Image (spheres, rainbow, N blue to C red):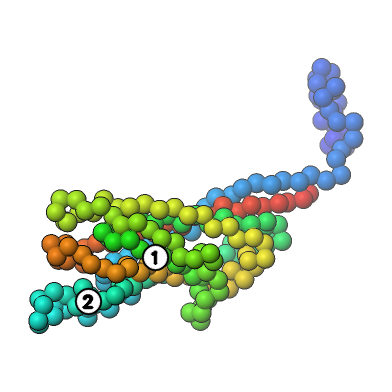
């Protein structure tokens, strides 16, 4: 009755554009974008850094981290797919976009992991190898750094999406490779940090 009423109410000049028959199905393929999380990490306890390495060595007078081959900094961001878990059958893929702003004057090797409630990894972001981020540029004698920016997209196809329902957080880990800083920069390192922003685009296929 509703279709008949609409047709009768349609101006005669538009009837030629109306379909002769109603389609049996209708398919919709929208892309929905949303933020996943953002965080900032540095040489502090909150970022999983061993702050004992900030102690000055009695012989050299420099912090103990200067003698380390690598420096690892890591932290977590909340992650929850429950809002879309009821529609997993309609998800084709999720594209995660990772943006990293490196405020250290050293290049970084970065990796991210989806972790469950038991603090066990569910999956990793970069299956082809860690994301490498170039060093930031020293400004004003070292007091400030012009961050280096790197972006990388990671596509999760349908078979990788379902296990993510068990993920409760994202663990972001960055390793400063072979730190050999200018001695003038060493006092500034505790104030340096790197920032991470992660967003996602969901490819949904719905058939009515």
On the rendered image, what quadrant is the N terminus found in?
Answer: top right
| x and y, in percent, of residue 201 in the image | 56, 52
| x and y, in percent, of residue 57 in the image | 13, 80
Q: Which residue is mark 1?
A: 109
Residue 12 to residue 185: above or below: above
- Name the residue: 37% across, 67% down: 174
Residue 197 to residue 180: above or below: above
Residue 50 to residue 137: above or below: below
| x and y, in percent, of residue 170 in the image | 47, 68
Q: Nearer the viewer, residue 208 or 107?
A: 107
Among the 4 quarters of the image, the one containing residue 84: bottom right
For the residues labelled 2 and 1, the Cα–Cα distance comes to 19 Å
Among the 4 quarters of the image, the one containing residue 53: bottom left
- Name the residue: 78% across, 49% down: 208
Q: Nearer the viewer, residue 183 or 97?
A: 183
Q: Which residue is mark 2?
A: 67
- Name the residue: 24% across, 61% down: 192
């Amino acid at each position: 009755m509703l279709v008949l009423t609409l047709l009768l109410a349609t101006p005669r000049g538009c009837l030629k554009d109306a379909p002769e028959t109603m389609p049996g199905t209708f398919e919709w393929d929208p892309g929905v974008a949303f933020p996943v999380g953002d965080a900032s990490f540095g040489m502090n306890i909150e970022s999983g850094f061993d702050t004992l390495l900030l102690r000055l060595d009695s012989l050299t007078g420099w912090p103990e981290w200067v003698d380390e081959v690598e420096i690892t900094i890591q932290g977590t961001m909340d992650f929850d797919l429950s809002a879309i878990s009821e529609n997993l059958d309609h998800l084709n893929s999720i594209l995660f976009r990772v943006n990293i702003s490196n405020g250290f004057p050293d290049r970084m090797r970065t990796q991210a992991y989806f972790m469950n409630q038991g603090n066990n990894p569910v999956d990793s972001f970069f299956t082809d190898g860690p994301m490498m981020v170039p060093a930031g540029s020293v400004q004003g004698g070292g007091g400030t750094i012009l961050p280096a920016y790197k972006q990388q997209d990671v596509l999760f196809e349908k078979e990788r999406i379902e296990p993510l329902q068990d993920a409760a957080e994202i663990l972001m880990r960055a390793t400063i490779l072979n730190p050999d800083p200018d001695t003038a920069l060493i006092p500034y390192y505790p104030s340096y940090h790197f920032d991470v922003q992660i967003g996602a685009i969901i490819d949904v296929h719905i058939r009515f």
